[in-house]
Amino acid sequence: MDLLTIENLNYTYNDGSLPVLEDINLNFEEGKVYAIMGKSGAGKTTLLSLISGLNSYKEGKILYKGSDIKTLDKENYRSRDIGIIFQSFNLLLHLNALENVMLSINLSKTKVENKKKHALNMLEKVELTEEKAKRRVLKLSGGEQQRVAIARALSYDPALIIADEPTGNLDGETEEQVLKILRNLAHVDNKCIIVVTHSEKVAMSSGIVYRL
Ligand SMILES: Nc1ncnc2c1ncn2[C@@H]1O[C@H](COP(=O)(O)OP(=O)(O)OP(=O)(O)O)[C@@H](O)[C@H]1O
Ligand SMILES: [Mg+2]
C-alpha cells in the first residue's frame, strides 16, 4: 500500500494568480527514495508545503496511509508522522546539535526513556560524534548542519521524510554523504524519502524520479 497518495491535486495561491499545480497524481511507498524535479517555479516547494500540511488545498486529495490529511489531527501528523528538512536547515544556531535534536523530541512529545541518549543516537546515525553534537551549530560546517537537520527530523521516527534541496549548498563529496544517509534511511529503516532537487546527480541516486 502507498504511504502517501496524491490524487487529482490542483492548487492556486489566494492572490488570483495562475494555478501552480494542475491535476497532480503521484504515489509514494515506504522503503524508497523519490526525487521531485522541475524548473524553478514549477511548484515543488508548494507541493511539499501541501504534503506537510503547511498549506491546505481545495481540489484533489492527499492521502496518508489511506486517510485524507485534511481529516487527520494536523499537529500529530506534523510532529510525528512527517519529518521536514529545509534547505536553510532552520536550526537554532546558538544551541548545540544535541540541544536542537532534544528540542524537537520535546516538541513532538515523543516518549523515550532517555531523551539525551536517544538524541545522541540519532546524531550518531548521521555520523556526528558526541564532540560535534556538543558544539554550537554555528560552529559546524554546512554539511554537518545539514546532518543535524536530518537527525532532528528523525528524532520522532516519522514514516515520511521530505527534504527541499537538502544538498543544494553542499560540495560534491558532502552531497554524496548526505545522499547515502537518506538512501540508508529508506533501504535500512524503511522510511519513505521525498527529495526536491535540481541536481541530476541527486535524481540519479534516488530510486524514482517525478517531474513537475
Ligand atoms: N506564498 C505565495 N503566494 C503566491 N504565489 C506563490 C507563493 N509561493 C510561491 N508562489 C508562486 O508559485 C509558483 C511555484 O512556486 P514554488 O516555490 O512552489 O516553486 P519551486 O518549484 O519550488 O521553485 P524553485 O525551484 O525556484 O524553488 C511560483 O510561480 C511562485 O511565484
Ligand atoms: Mg522551491
Image (cartoon, rainbow, N blue to C red):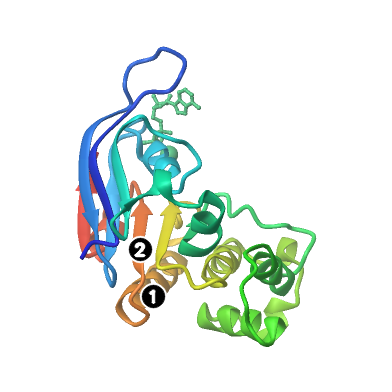
Rendered residue at 69%/70% (across/down): 97
Query: Label 2: which residue?
Result: 193
Q: Residues within 10 Å of mark 2 (few under 14, many from 20)?
A: many
Q: Residues within 10 Å of mark 1 (few under 14, many from 20)?
A: many
- Do the residues bearing badges 1 and 2 touch, measured as CB atoms within 8 Å? yes
Quadrant occupied by the C terminus: top left
Q: Earlier in the sequence, mark 1 or mark 2?
A: 1
Name the kind of residue labelled 2 in the image. Answer: Ile
Rendered residue at 28%/56% (across/down): 66
Name the kind of residue labelled 1 in the image. Answer: Leu
In the rendered image, residue 2, in percent from the top left (x then y), is placed at: 23, 61
Kindly state the secondary structure of the residue where label 2 is placed: strand
Look at the picture and state if 82 lies above or below 127. Answer: above
Ligand 1, what quadrant?
A: top left
As drawn, is 110 to the left or to the right of 84? right
In the rendered image, residue 107, in percent from the top left (x then y), is placed at: 67, 62
Residues 92 and 160: in front is: 160
Q: Could you tell me how far apart the alpha carbons at marks 1 and 2 are, in whole angstroms?
A: 8 Å
Q: Confirm if mark 2 falls within 8 A of ligand 2.
A: no
Rendered residue at 26%/57% (across/down): 203
In the rendered image, residue 194, in percent from the top left (x then y), is placed at: 35, 57
Rendered residue at 22%/38% (across/down): 24
Q: Quadrant of residue 205?
A: bottom left
Task: State the count of labels.
Answer: 2
Residues 21 and 135: in front is: 21
Q: Quadrant of residue 136?
A: bottom right
Quadrant occupied by the N terminus: bottom left
Residues 98 and 191: in front is: 191
Query: Label 1: which residue?
Result: 185
Kindly state the secondary structure of the residue where label 1 is placed: helix
Whether residue 78 appears in this view of the structure is: yes
